[in-house]
Image (cartoon, rainbow, N blue to C red):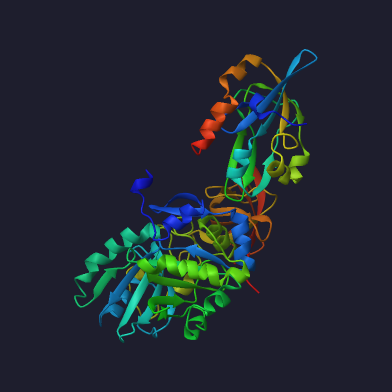
Amino acid sequence: MTTSLRTTPLHSWHVSQKARMAEFAGYDMPIQYTTIVNEHQATREKVTLFDISHMGRLRFEGTRAVELLDHLLTRRVRDMQIGQIRYSLVTNVDGGILDDVLVYCLESPSGRNYFLLVVNASNRDKIVKWIQPHLADYPDVEFTDVTDMTAMIAVQGPKAIETCTKLLPPSATKLEYYNGKVTEQFGKPCIVSRTGYTGEDGLELIVRAEDANRVWENLLLSGRQFDIQAAGLGARDTLRLEAGMPLYGHELDEQTDPYQAGLGFAVQLKDRTFIGSDAIRSRKADGSLLVRVCLMIEGRRAAREGSELYDMDGHRVGRVSSGTFSPTLQTPIAMGFVPPALAAVGTTLEADIRGSRAAARVVPLPFYKRK
Amino acid sequence: MNLNLEKLFYCPTHEWISIEQVGGETIGTVGITSFAVEQLTDLVFMALPKVGQTFAAGQEFGEVESVKAVSPVYLPVAGEIIEVNTPLVDQLTILNEDPYTKGWIVKIKVSDPSQTSALLSYADYQKQCSSGH
């Protein structure tokens, strides 16, 4: 079975470290090298490296690339400045979420402008297929899936920037949050962005596949003074949950619209049309649709995905989409979907955890915010 | 007390049981193996049964929860719970440190001692673990 899985350029490093490996989105990925809690805390307190090369990276170049993306994405692209990055959504005609993405507006060293779309690994094939038929309408757009020829590394934690200062030019380590640029790492091309999926400060690096191991080793060396360590997808999940960030396939899917998911900030409807905009407009006004909430669960047992939620009269009102035991807060936390009337902060619900009920209190998003 | 791991019986689901004769009764002490503890990592919660409850062989009698997932714990042979290691609930580190002695989970009055013949020997269990399961 392992042979049929895709691997990242850093795969043999993970195996050499005896990481616990598992399939994720068709890739054989490291879940943990030590323990989830250890890697989670190292990210909150120091600095960790994540191999996120499985994320899809799609490049759009050409004068009409901006039009194509404006047609596909919930958030305006045409006013993006070089160096800006935006969180956005791809929706279907019904307003359901096909993927949540980062759009990078970049300039190559030769002065060519292009856009990069970083998509979920699990949605990469779907999104490529979704884009393909539209390319005919924008014949000058050069579309390239650059995932396999590149690698992506996240450096996350309070010491992430310091870790990178020796390896990257100051213009890269001084980037503002949600900005990125094409730069060089020891003479090799590298896209750096001040982004992440952990709730901590940090950078994400996109490098050529053949440079991945060298960059990874350099980062480990440079971060040694901060006790840098690698972290796996297990910690990535608990970190993003504490940060209140949705995960496709859990909080987001094709039946859920951006407003239900609490992602209204990533939608611009005014004076725009894009695929799904009409449906999203009418769904926005529909008060019957379930909405995402953050929940703190009483006790020590985690309410995990699929756990059903009840109101205080015992009516089933929704379900948990993600849940874990929060290593930072030392309490079970969850995200789930409930009717808007029960979504106010402070509302008490009950979660069914394998047959017994535990109080679930609606709390503000996020669970954890860095100081 | 130092248990001789080779004298224990094991389940494919990573429980162990030691058997002793006490005043004409067959008493079993049940826990989970160090392999299981290592696989689970980051333990946060344990649900234990009550004294007096009876379970069939292979029936779930408790659960152990880690940050990543929850795993049921199964009784290796049928029996009645006669003692529960309650301090475990508040000190799951005991399981990490000492899963075979201080980390025992329940003691049972074994209903049918012959059921141990269906369990794995130490050698067979080791073989299963070394294949990664």
Q: Residue furthest top?
A: B24
Could you say where residue A257 lies in the image, as x and y percent from the top left? Answer: 43, 63
Q: Nearer the viewer, residue B91 or B53?
A: B91
Question: The N terminus of chain A lies in which quarter of the figure?
Answer: top left
Q: Is residue A311 left or right of residue B129?
A: right
Residue sitting at x 59%, y 47%: A315
Q: What is the count of numbered marks?
A: 0
Q: Quadrant of the C terminus of chain A?
A: bottom right
Determine whether, in the image, residue B34 is placed left or right of residue A149: right
Query: Do we see residue B132 in this rendering?
Result: yes
| Depicted A156 relative to depicted B117: above or below | below
Q: Image quadrant of residue A343?
A: bottom right
Residue located at (44% from left, 76% from top)? A192
Report x, y in % for residue A363.
64, 63
Q: Nearer the viewer, residue A147 or A355?
A: A147
Query: Residue B10 at x, y = what percent?
Result: 60, 28
Furthest residue to the right?
B23
Location of residue A67 in the rendering, given as x and y in whole percent from the top left corner: 29, 79
Q: Would you identify the image quadrant in which residue A146 lies?
A: bottom left
Q: Nearer the viewer, residue A220 or A60?
A: A220
Vertical order, A286 against A14 (above or below):
below
